[in-house]
Image (spheres, rainbow, N blue to C red):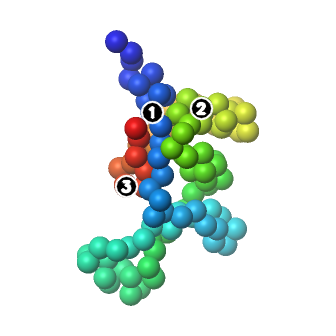
Amino acid sequence: MPDKLEIYLNLVPIRNETIKLDEEEGSPVLLVPMDSLFDFLAIRRHGRYRRLKLDDLGAFVWRLCDGEKTVREIGEEVRNIYGDSAEPLYERLIYFLLELKKRHLLELK
């Protein structure tokens, strides 16, 4: 039976297509539409989108979540670009992807 890490490495992250990556004040942000009735007051105050700031590594990973690459393949690309600064690579990557999943920003298939 494969261990938990191996299971995660074989998953394919798929972005929620309603979420857009943009840049504000020189920093990457995810624009998450506020379309719930419960968002009414927030929409009046902040506009139609909730903004989630990312660092450059997070934005790089977001772009790679194309519905085709596995977590392992994304990790390899991260390692090629960011090297040792991304370590501990797979622990950080999986944690980040699970946080995005928890917020319904992507799926893991």
Residue 62 can be seen in this image: yes
Amino acid tagged 2: Glu
The residue lying furthest to the bottom in this view is: 44
Q: CA distance from mark 1 to mark 2?
A: 10 Å
Residue 35 placement (x, y as % from top left):
34, 74
Residue under circle 1? 11
Residue 96 can be seen in this image: no
Residue under circle 3? 103
Quarter placement of the N terminus: top left
Q: Is residue 107 left or right of residue 90?
A: left
Residue 82 placement (x, y as % from top left):
71, 39
- Rendered residue at 60%/45% (across/down): 64
Q: CA distance from mark 3 to mark 1?
A: 18 Å
- Rendered residue at 44%/56% (across/down): 16
Element at label 2: helix
Element at label 1: loop
Q: Residues within 10 Å of mark 1 (few under 14, many from 20)?
A: some
